[in-house]
Amino acid sequence: MNYTYVIAEMACSHEGDINLAKVIIDASVEAGADAVQLQIWNLKQMMSPQRKEFQLLEKLEFDQEEWKSLVNYSRSKYPDLDIYVCVYEHSSIEFISGLGVDGFKINSSDLSNPLVLKKVAATNKPINLSIGASSIQEIQNALEIISDTSSSPVTLMYGHQSFPTKPESVNMSYMQTMSYLFGLPIGYQDHSDADSDAAYWLPASSLGMGVTILEKHLTHDRSLKGIDHESALNPDEFIAFVDMVRIIDTAKGLSTPRPFSEEENKYREFQKKSIVASRDLDKGHILTTDDLAFMRAQELGYSPEKLDLIIGKIITCEIKAYQTITEKDFT
């Protein structure tokens, strides 16, 4: 099965409350996500206090002991749940690496930041490289820095990040171009309006375009309109979302030929045409084209393409009209 790795993106939906963060981790596991993604940063290293968002983020920021507590909670209760961390500045990377996380996401804001790129690459952990609103040259430069530092596997994470993103802004075909251009697997970060059906069918369409990772925001209660709520699914919605992904995974199957399944063989028996007698034929009759017809019959026999192989053959038994012609009818 073509398995899609599903990441439940917590972002700032925890609203600065460690207990809400635990609720989101619980919900990601209940839904069957493969990983939960945290956003860890030292605000003073990430953003100028002159930015209007600074005071809000200051209220949301967990300290290192709180992050340790949250990671320990996840590891002890859900050892099979991977933990990814999205980084936003270089000073926290050593601390994050020490938490024993399973992989990193580099936000597109740091695509041109060699300090972040080198420090993350030096961990040798998988890297999900966000490429939203980035030029080809910026992506190329970032990949060169990573590959010069380590052999960390990289997945390009594509997604237009408005809050929420309108479908006409996604430009999903360009995602495939990036994958082909750089020869790397591609992932999709969805930011569709969580109150719309697009929150399901847009990610579903990305699965048909070859994505290997699907990142989706998860919150505790979207109706409260908290932080990062616009594109975040509620816990019950996230269950339905992951179920949808797994059904599509099953349907994708393999890209290479395989033996017919039992269902396909039944379908062939129902649908495919065979060569049948167009009228009653006596034993010893020499077959001509007029004796035969192509029809869906009671059983599969010679396919129509085999007509030239049986014309002129002598039948060794009586054949009734509409009876399938088979090998046992000839000398």
Image (cartoon, rainbow, N blue to C red):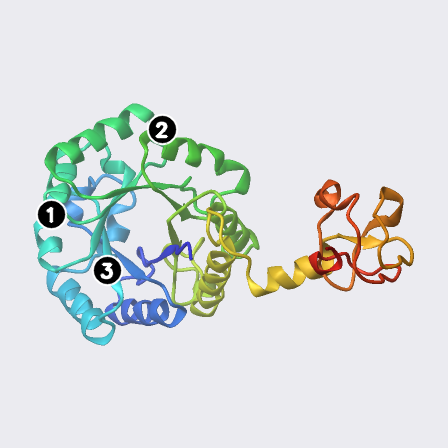
The residue carrying mark 2 is 181
Residue 171 at least partly seen: no
Callout 2: SS: helix
Furthest toward the bottom, the residue is 77
Residue drawn at x 34%, y 70% as measured from the top left: 29
Disc assigned to residue 134: none
Which of disc 3 and disc 1 is earlier in sequence? 3
Residue 213 or residue 42, whichever sits in front: 213
Q: Where residue 223 appears, x then y in whole percent?
A: 47, 64
Residue 309 at least partly seen: yes
Callout 1: SS: loop
Residue drawn at x 22%, y 27% as measured from the top left: 141
* Spatial separation of the CA atoms under disc 3 and disc 2: 29 Å
The residue carrying mark 3 is 83
Residue 238 or residue 250, whichever sits in front: 250
Quadrant of the snapshot with the N terminus: bottom left
* Spatial separation of the CA atoms under disc 1 and disc 3: 15 Å
Which of disc 1 and disc 2 is earlier in sequence? 1
Residue drawn at x 15%, y 65% as measured from the top left: 66
Furthest toward the top, the residue is 137
- The amino acid sitting under disc 1 is Thr
Which image quarter: residue 120?
Answer: top left
The residue carrying mark 1 is 123
Which image quarter: residue 160?
Answer: top left
Quadrant of the snapshot with the C terminus: bottom right
Left or right of 176 on screen, residue 284? right
Left or right of 259 on screen, residue 148? left
Residue 319 or residue 125, whichever sits in front: 319
Q: Looking at the image, is 145 positioned above or below residue 222?
A: above
Left or right of 297 on screen, residue 27? left
Circles 2, 1 touching at the beta carbon (< 8 Å) = no
- The amino acid sitting under disc 3 is Ile
